[in-house]
């Protein structure tokens, strides 16, 4: 069972950094969130992001940076089994839930609701 | 650099400086605080959901997946109900940085363009905001994967 | 005999009449400080239409009908329909023109469309090319957001310099014979780009154009700011109006109590979350043709100078790294 305190602190810290980037740089949310994903991927490649998840639980796995980590992990683990082609075949293995859920739920929501403005 | 009309009595660079000076400063501390607290709260909620799944018998690694799905469902629903954007006005990065932001970007785009139909509207425009996140995630994983495979 | 005055202005003699005006707004504008001055306040943003765009069309058509009804003017008496809006290909105006069945001049001036349309209409009438012209403009918050910025349900935190697009429509009839107020003079603005790239800081993008047009107006017609009881800009908002004062001061023009901005007048900043103020074609549209029109007819204001301001960028030009050009057109109204 994960600790709530570390989840709060680490998750809050990720968002704090994001907020400072929103307010202090001319970049759009799209730019900044992409940056988070890239950073998560690089940390994942270095084996550091998983340690962060072990420490902070949802505080590290919910921020969008973990998406980058999951893509990298999927690519690397499949590559270690099947060679370089594994990068392509394994990449979405761990992120499949998130992407599929986002698509299905967004679609269903759009069918049921209307934008309110 | 276009010429500044003479009646304005100001140089181009001078105007850039004036415009910058007049731009209001964002409430840095207040925004940082609300982002920290709301982001932390979302992660605590996520942790609670994950702990709930573990209590139901899943082992910790497997519990992460349905947790993400549940959080995404919640964010999509709030978007559909018209509540997410109101919360985000206050929470800022606290809602944008977690996967809730990703879900909201896909859902809000799908909602907005549904009037243009399933294919030309929802289908074509759904990823207009989220696409960049997916693209750069994949590119990063590809490069890191290659480097890792070679060394 | 109407004639060109100076470099960019026209002085009308006899001045055409702004003989009728009508305004319709959305719920938020109805709750604002000027709520009572609008002819119709809609209770929601869809007005039972299939989309926000269709709702904006309905608003424009409603404003036009009301403007005609108020003075018992028949559609057949109108020589030209002049209209513009914010949407791509000005579809709200084009489709409304189809409904009205009138000869149509489609105009694009972004948020400066009100004075652009009034200027053009006044020139047509004073030039003897029309007896009656119907001029109209509209904007809708959700339509503008989804076209220029983000989907309406997207969780985006607006910065302090951002402005809120007004939902509403305004229409006026300009006639060769009719009732005051009258359009005494107009100054047509140049498009001015001084490098502002932040699409959420349109006040800073448009202020130079407003300053240029105002200064040219004063020079062309040899007037000073105190000639007018009130000078209003369209939607410079909090930031843009501050910059305007500074720019005018550099050229020796000072506007004291007789200056205001429609974007600051239409909402109550304490109660309504609009950051730097209102914007959109309907911002100056409804404030001028609703609130100021009433005040002029009531004898509270005799000479009003309206300077609607527009930003001529698009999401494409922004994406390609171009800065935002601004334009402002001035219309002098007199009793």
Image (cartoon, coloured by chain):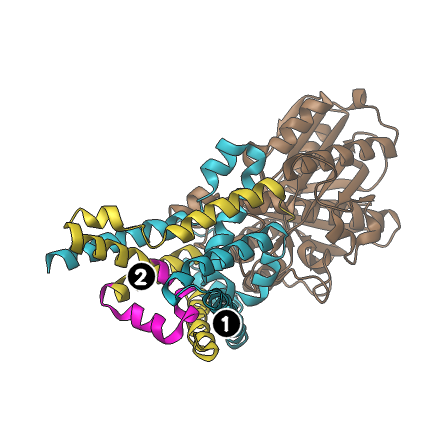
Chain colours: A yellow, B cyan, C brown
Where C18 sits versus C148, above or below?
Answer: above
- Characterize the magenta stretch by its predominant secondary structure: helix
Name the residue at 49% across, 45% down: A104
- Asked if residue C322 lies left or right of residue C223, the reply is left
Q: Position of residue A113 (x, y in %)?
A: 63, 44
- Chain for numbered disc 2: A
Label 1 CA crowd tier, 10 Å (few <14, some 14–19, many 20+): many
Q: Position of residue C77 (x, y in %)?
A: 80, 22
- Please state which of residues C286 and C42 is positioned toward the viewer in this rendering: C42
Dot 1: element: helix
**Which residue is tagged 1?**
B44
Distance from label 1 to label 2 (Cα)? 20 Å
Name the residue at 82% across, 51% down: C302
- Asked if residue A24 lies left or right of residue B145, the reply is right
Q: Over which residues does the magenta segment extend?
A: A45-67
Residue C149 visible (yes or no): no
Q: Which mark is residue A69?
A: 2
């Amino acid at each position: 069972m994960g600790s709530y305190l570390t989840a709060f602190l680490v998750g809050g810290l990720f968002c704090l950094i994001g907020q400072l980037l929103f307010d202090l740089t001319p970049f759009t949310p799209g730019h900044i969130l992409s940056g988070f994903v890239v950073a998560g991927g690089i940390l994942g490649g270095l084996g550091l992001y998983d340690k962060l998840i072990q420490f902070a639980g949802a505080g590290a796995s919910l921020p969008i940076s973990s998406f980058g980590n999951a893509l990298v992990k999927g690519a690397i683990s499949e590559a270690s089994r099947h060679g370089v082609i594994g990068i392509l075949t394994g990449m979405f293995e761990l992120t499949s839930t998130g992407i599929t859920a986002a698509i299905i739920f967004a679609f269903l929501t759009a069918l049921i609701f209307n934008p309110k403005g | 650099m276009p010429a500044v009309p003479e009646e304005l009595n100001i140089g181009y660079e001078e105007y850039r400086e004036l415009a910058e000076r007049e731009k209001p400063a964002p409430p840095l501390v207040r925004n940082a605080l609300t982002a920290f607290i709301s982001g932390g709260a979302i992660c605590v909620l996520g942790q609670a959901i994950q702990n709930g799944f573990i209590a139901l018998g899943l082992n910790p690694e497997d519990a992460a997946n349905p947790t993400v799905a549940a959080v995404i469902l919640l964010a999509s629903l709030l978007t559909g109900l018209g509540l997410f954007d109101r919360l985000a006005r206050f929470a800022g990065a606290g809602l944008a940085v977690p996967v809730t932001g990703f879900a909201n970007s896909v859902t809000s785009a799908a909602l907005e363009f549904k009037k243009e139909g399933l294919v030309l509207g929802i289908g074509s425009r759904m990823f207009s905001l989220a696409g960049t996140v997916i693209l750069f995630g994949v590119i990063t994983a590809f490069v890191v994967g290659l480097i890792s495979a070679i060394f | 005999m109407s004639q060109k005055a100076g470099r960019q202005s026209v002085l009308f003699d006899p001045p055409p009449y702004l003989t009728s005006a009508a305004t319709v707004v959305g719920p938020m504008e109805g709750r604002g400080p000027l709520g009572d001055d609008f002819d119709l306040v809609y209770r929601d943003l869809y007005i039972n239409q299939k989309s926000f765009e269709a709702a904006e069309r309905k608003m424009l058509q409603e404003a036009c009908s009301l403007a005609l009804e108020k003075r018992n003017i028949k559609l057949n008496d109108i020589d030209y329909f002049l209209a513009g809006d914010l949407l791509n290909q000005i579809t709200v105006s084009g489709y409304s023109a189809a409904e009205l069945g009138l000869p149509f001049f489609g105009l694009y001036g972004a948020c400066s469309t009100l004075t652009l349309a009034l200027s053009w209409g006044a020139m047509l009438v004073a030039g003897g090319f029309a007896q009656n012209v119907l001029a109209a403009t509209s904007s809708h918050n959700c339509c503008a957001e989804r076209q220029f910025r983000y989907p309406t349900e997207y969780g985006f935190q607006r910065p302090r310099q951002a402005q809120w697009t007004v939902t509403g429509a305004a229409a006026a009839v300009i006639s060769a014979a009719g009732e005051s107020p009258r359009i005494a003079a107009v100054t047509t603005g140049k498009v001015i780009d001084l490098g502002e790239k932040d699409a959420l800081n349109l006040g800073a993008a448009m202020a130079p154009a407003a300053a240029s047009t105002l200064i040219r107006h004063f020079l062309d017609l040899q007037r000073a700011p105190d000639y007018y009881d009130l000078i209003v800009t369209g939607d410079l908002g909090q930031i843009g109006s501050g910059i305007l004062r500074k720019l005018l001061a550099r050229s020796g023009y000072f506007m004291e109590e007789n200056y205001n901005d429609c974007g600051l007048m239409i909402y109550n900043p304490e109660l309504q979350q609009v950051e730097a103020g209102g914007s959109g074609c309907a911002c100056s549209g409804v404030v001028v043709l609703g609130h100021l029109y009433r005040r002029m007819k009531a004898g509270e204001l005799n000479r009003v100078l309206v300077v609607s301001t527009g930003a001529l960028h698009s999401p494409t030009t922004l994406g390609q790294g171009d800065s935002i050009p601004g334009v402002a057109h001035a219309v002098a109204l007199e009793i």
